[in-house]
Each structure stands twice: as structure tokens, then as C-alpha cells.
Amino acid sequence: MDKVRFGIIGIGNMGSAHAQYLFNGEIKGAVLGAVCDIKESRRTWAREKFGADLPIFENYKELLKSGTCDVVLIATPHYLHPVIAIDAFNAGLNVISEKPVGVYTKAVKEMMDVAKKSGKSFGVMFNQRTNPVYRKMREIIQSGQLGELKRFVWIITDWYRTQYYYDSGDWRATWSGEGGGVLMNQCPHNLDLWQWLFGMPKSVTAFCDYGKYHNIEVEDDVTAYAKYENGATAVFITTTGECPGTNRLEITGSKGALIAEGKSFKWIKNEEDERVYCFNAKDGFKKIKNTSEVLTPEYEMLEQHRGITQNFTNHLLYGEELIASGYEGINGLLLCNSIMLSSWKNCTVEIGADGNEDEFYELLKQRIATSKRKETVNKDATVADMSSTYNN
């Protein structure tokens, strides 16, 4: 193919942004092939924005069989991501899913099986993997320059949201509409980066508060503590109810530490490996000498969502390795599901243990059964009101 044709399914907040940069020609080798949305208001917006020549569909299945696209980018409510992806793979199309890849791992595993059988490419919109700070931190960790990993602490409490945000749609912050709160909506990128940088833990103990700061059903305050096979630990704290909040990531190893805040990070380098120094030192209190530098890495690549879309286009045209394979999307979701399950059961959860997946799904279904959509919503809220740097 000379040009990769993208079909956007769901042109709300994120879908409309994807459609606009594709329509504007901001992705080399790619074009906007079609859009789809069940809401007439969004289809009207698309006609006014993109003109009469662009195919616009109400039913995504009509788009899948239209022949207008090589790839579908799914930007619908969370529960529909695996459903639409399965239909797209069966229709012979490549797929990029917005985050998260699903709400529960049972559905995602089914989607992954269909994807593998189809032989088509599968990506996920983990655009924070294009962030040069996290990319450089990962490079340092994987090179062994941080030594044996000891501790991961991420305090990300700057996801502040008002009640107006939650009242912008009857589906928002409901078990039946989103399947979760800050973990499922704001933090999929952070949960992905957690395991991408530090690996998957073996167990987690978590505490979630539901509707602590807002009139919502789902979690808006979370503290999780995880353990690793080598004895390393991780602490993950997040909320949508603090202002101003903070975003600080600290990763410690035997050879130093990485501390990230904003567009830079500090790299502290021990002159000796702490594990060696500890048992050879002749002083009970003397610390290891270290040096530090502040790095503000830059990469010649498109930022955020455009970076993932450009990479997926290059993958199809030239075989470029995917930055964010859709098959990796299950890892962050497994962390999310395990944190919720631990909170619901008030106990430590072994991540990936037999029976956890089924138990989580059953407990989620109980919450869905009693979930209530909002009767009052802010109908004057616009897509612009709800937009943010890289999340819904």
C-alpha cells in the first residue's frame, strides 16, 4: 500500500483529535479514510469539519465492510474496545485501540487470540511511551546502569477533576459505563509505564475509595503496595480529588536512583554498588559517594498520540517495530484489575493467580448490575471542555 487509510470509530473527545490530525495530513503516509459515531451530533460535526467526500458511518460494522480503511482506531467507551477489535480483525483489518484495551482481562484475552489468528497488526494508544523522559529512564534501567532494582514509587495526584467533568456524560464514572474511575480512565498510561519500566510485580495490596471526593460510583482515590520476586517493592498513589497535586516518579536501584518530575529527571549515580558496599564498608554510617545530573532528553519524533499513529503507519509500510503493541496492553490492565480486586476483597492479591480473573469479572458484574447512569448531565459541556494532554 502507498497510503494507510485510517477509520476512526468513535469521534468524541479522543477520536475527534485523531481524526483531525489525520485529516490535516500530519501523519506521513497516512490519510483519514472514514469516521463512525452513533451520535448524530458527532456525525454532523464530522460533515462540517471534513466535508461531504469523507465516508461517515453510524454503524461501525458498516465501516468495517466498506473497503474505505486499512486500519481502525477504536475510541469508543471502554467496554466496546475488545468487541469492535474482534469484529475488525475478523474483517481483515488492522487495529489500534485507545487505552485501555478493555475493562477486564477475560475479554482482552479473547481479543488477543482473534488478533493472533487474523495475522493483522495490533497496537494500543500508549502515547506516553513516546515521552523522551520515560524512554531515557527505561534505557538506563535496561542497560543495567541502575543495578538491581529495589523500589518504585509513583505519586501521581495531579489528575484533578471537578464534578462538572464527571457530569459531562451519563456514562462517566459508572460501573456500567466505564468500568472504573481514576485507574480505568486517567491511569492506564501510568500503569503501563509502571510495568514497562519496572516489570510486573507478583502481588499487590491496595486500598481504593469510591466517590470519596465526588458524587460518583467508582474509585477516585487509590493507594497500592506491590511486591516483586527479587524483594523489590512498588507504591502507586493516585487520585482525582487533590489540587494542586503532584507527579513524582522515583525509581531506586543498587547503583543509584532516577527521579522524574515534569520534562526532566535526575539521575543519581552511586560510585559503588550498594549491595557490595554494604557488606564491605568499614564504617557503620558512611554513605556511598555519588554524582547526579539532570537530564532533559529530546528525541526527533512526533509527540504523544501522533507519535504512536506515525509509528503504526511506519510499521505497516516499512516494518518498523511497534512502540506499543496491543498485546502488551493486558499488563497494565492486569495491574488495574488486581488493585481493584485487592480493594474489594480487602486482602493481598497474587497477580495472575488462577481464579482471580473469573472472580474479578463476577464482582465487576455485581457492580454493573446495581450501577446507575446519571439523570442530570452538563449538556452544554463540549469536547474542548473535556480535553487534556493525553487522557480522557
Image (cartoon, rainbow, N blue to C red):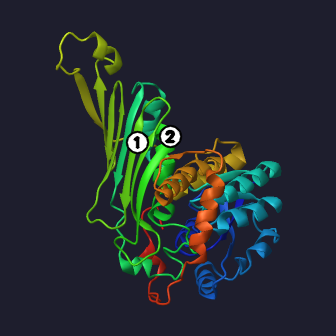
**Kind of element beneath mark 2:** loop
Residue 255 to residue 346: above or below: above
The mark found on residue 234 in the picture is 1
Residue 75 to residue 301: above or below: below
- The x, y position of residue 251, in whole percent, is 36, 37
Q: Which residue is drawn at 60% across and 70% down?
A: 366
Q: Determine the CA span between mark 2 and mark 1.
A: 8 Å
Residue situated in front as seen by the camera: 84 or 342: 342
Q: Which of marks 2 and 1 is nearer the N terminus?
A: 2
Q: Residue at x 46, y 87 (%)?
A: 377
Q: Which quadrant of the structure image shows residue 98?
A: bottom right
> Callout 1, which amino acid?
Ala
- The x, y position of residue 60, in whole percent, is 73, 74
| Tags 2 and 1 touching, CB below 8 Å | yes
Q: Which quadrant of the structure image shows residue 58?
A: bottom right
Q: Can residue 122 be seen in this view?
A: yes
Residue density around tag 2, few if under 14, some if 14–19, many if 20 or more, within 10 Å: many
Which residue position is annotated with label 2?
201
Q: Residue at x 69, y 83 (%)?
A: 52
**Kind of element beneath mark 1:** strand
Q: Which quadrant of the structure image shows residue 213?
A: bottom left
Specify whether 77 is left or right of 5.
Answer: left
Residue situated in front as seen by the camera: 123 or 84: 84
> Callout 2, which amino acid?
Pro
